[in-house]
Image: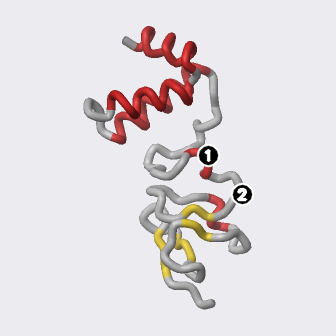
Amino acid sequence: TTKVEFRASLTLGCDQYEKELKENLFEFYTVAEFKYFMQQMRTLAGSDVSSSVPLAWTCDPSYYNVSDGCDCACGAWDPDCADASLEVFGCATPTDVCANTNGGTCQAGTG
C-alpha cells in the first residue's frame, strides 16, 4: 500500500493528501499513527518542511519553531518559547508564560 499512497501524495500534493486522509481515514487510525504516517510521507516525497516538527506536536505544524510567537500547550515544546520577547499563544491570559514542562505548560506570569 505504501507505493499507492506515495503515488497519491505526489498526484494530490502532500497537503491535499493530508486533508483527504484527515477527512476519510481518521476512523481507522489514531492521531499518533496518522502523524507518523504523514511524517513518513513527507520524508518519502523529499519534503523537509515538517521534518523537524515533533510527532507529539498537536498545533498547526506551520507554527512550530518559526519565530512567529510562542505556541504553548501544543503537546511539545515550541523553541520560539525560549524567546521571552515573543507573544505567547494558547494560554488563558496575555500575561501567562509558557514553561518547558510536559511539552509546554501555561503558567501565570508576573505582569
Q: Measuring 56% from the left and 85% from the top, which residue is drawn there?
A: 109
Spot occupied by residue 84 in the image (x, y as percentages of width and height)? 69, 74
Q: Is residue 13 left or right of residue 69?
A: left
Q: Is residue 26 or residue 37 the one in the foreground? A: 26
Q: Measuring 55% from the left and 18% from the top, which residue is drawn there?
A: 12
Query: What is the three-letter code of the residue carrying label 2?
Result: Ser
Q: Measuring 57% from the left and 61% from the top, which residue is drawn there?
A: 71
Up the image or down, 110 lies above or below 77; here it is below
The image quarter in which residue 22 lies: top left
Spot occupied by residue 103 in the image (x, y as percentages of width and height)? 46, 61
Query: What is the three-letter code of the residue carrying label 1?
Result: Ser
* Numbered mark located on residue 23 in the image: none
Q: Which residue is mark 1?
A: 62
Q: Which residue is mark 2?
A: 67
Up the image or down, 100 lies above or below 111; here it is above
* Mark nearer the viewer, 1 or 2: 1
For label 2, the crowd category at 10 Å Cα-Cα, with few meaning under 14, some 14 to 19 and many 20 or more, is some
Label count reads: 2
Spot occupied by residue 1 in the image (x, y as percentages of width and height)? 36, 11
Image quarter in which the C terminus is found: bottom right
Q: Measuring 53% from the left and 65% from the top, which residue is drawn there?
A: 72
Up the image or down, 31 lies above or below 76; here it is above
Q: Secondary structure at mark 2?
A: loop
The image quarter in which residue 49 lies: top right
- Cβ atoms under marks 1 and 2 closer than 8 Å: no
